[in-house]
Image (tube, rainbow, N blue to C red):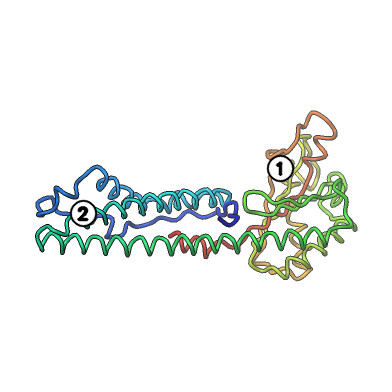
Amino acid sequence: MKKLIYSALLLTAVSCAPHKVCDTTVKEDSKYAKMLYTPRYKEALHERDSLCTQSKELMQDTSSLGKILRSEKQKLAKELKDHADLKKLYENLEKSSGAQLSQMNEDLTRKQTELEEKQKKVDQLEKLLSEHQAMLDNLFSSIKRALVDFSPSELTVEMKNGKLYVSLLDKLLFKSGSADVEERGVEALNKLSSVLNGHSNFEILVEGHTDNLPIKTAVYRDNWDLSTYRAASVVRLMIQSKVEIGRLTAAGKGEFHPIAGNDSPEGRSKNRRTEIILVPDLSAIMNLIK
């Protein structure tokens, strides 16, 4: 099985109205009901109906999409086995009455159609996930090449949870207590923007982060203010570099999302950062799941 992506999206919750087929059952008074209402057949019906609720679970973080796909394929394999058992039952009933045989044939044909449609959907989802991962890998490599002149003590690039994170440390972008981007920070943002202009299918979230040392100036009342102004400054520079404004979002996180302890200068330095989070467009995957 191909490599699957990490999870998406997030990002948006959708609901799935159950299809009519989920409520379709064999009438208990039909002539062959007793033959079909076995534990195995009931379990198959339960598995069939439970698929209508799966899309809510599929809307979790994009990092879980691969796990969901594997689960769906396991369920499909079980249904294929159930289908084989039903086919065997049909063969055993070939000598039964014509009416029973005709109805069984209809059920078998319907089940076969459902399984083929489900297999087609799983194949499409796997293909989309593979394309999505290739897109992430391509952008990741492009950003790493563009920012090769910057050291890990200035910025880092990593992929996690189906997204790309470019984390620029405070010393690269800002002076202490300031939201004005320094010259070397402008250089890094211009290079990053140049790459992102060629990958328009990614949304761009800019988050400002601070350490926990309090700040209060004539301009910034607290760390919330400072982190928000810094995120906005980065967004404005990216707009100047021709990044489409509709793709950009600025957010101030203040001191409340640290990645290291604030009890040492080194930890506080890591926490003073601006994260540029690149979120891929998952609409095709979400539409298929929905």
Residue type, numbered disc 1: Gly
Residue position marked by numbered label 2 in the rendering = 25
Residue 149 left/right relative to 2: right
Quadrant in the picture for residue 108: bottom left
User: Residue 226 appears at what percent x and percent y?
Assistant: 76, 46
SS at circle 1: loop
Query: In this orientation, which residue lies closer to the viewer: 233 or 139?
Result: 139
- Residue 36, given in percent of the width and then of the height, sits at 19, 50
Whole-angstrom CA distance, mark 2 to mark 1, is: 56 Å
Q: Say which mark, if any, is on residue 254.
A: 1
Q: Earlier in the sequence, mark 2 or mark 1?
A: 2
Residue at image coords 84%, 55%: 181
In front here: 150 or 39?
39
Q: Nearer the viewer, mark 2 or mark 1?
A: 2
Question: The disc labelled 2 sits on which kind of residue?
Answer: Thr
Describe residue 161's horizontal placement relative to residue 94 as left or right.
right
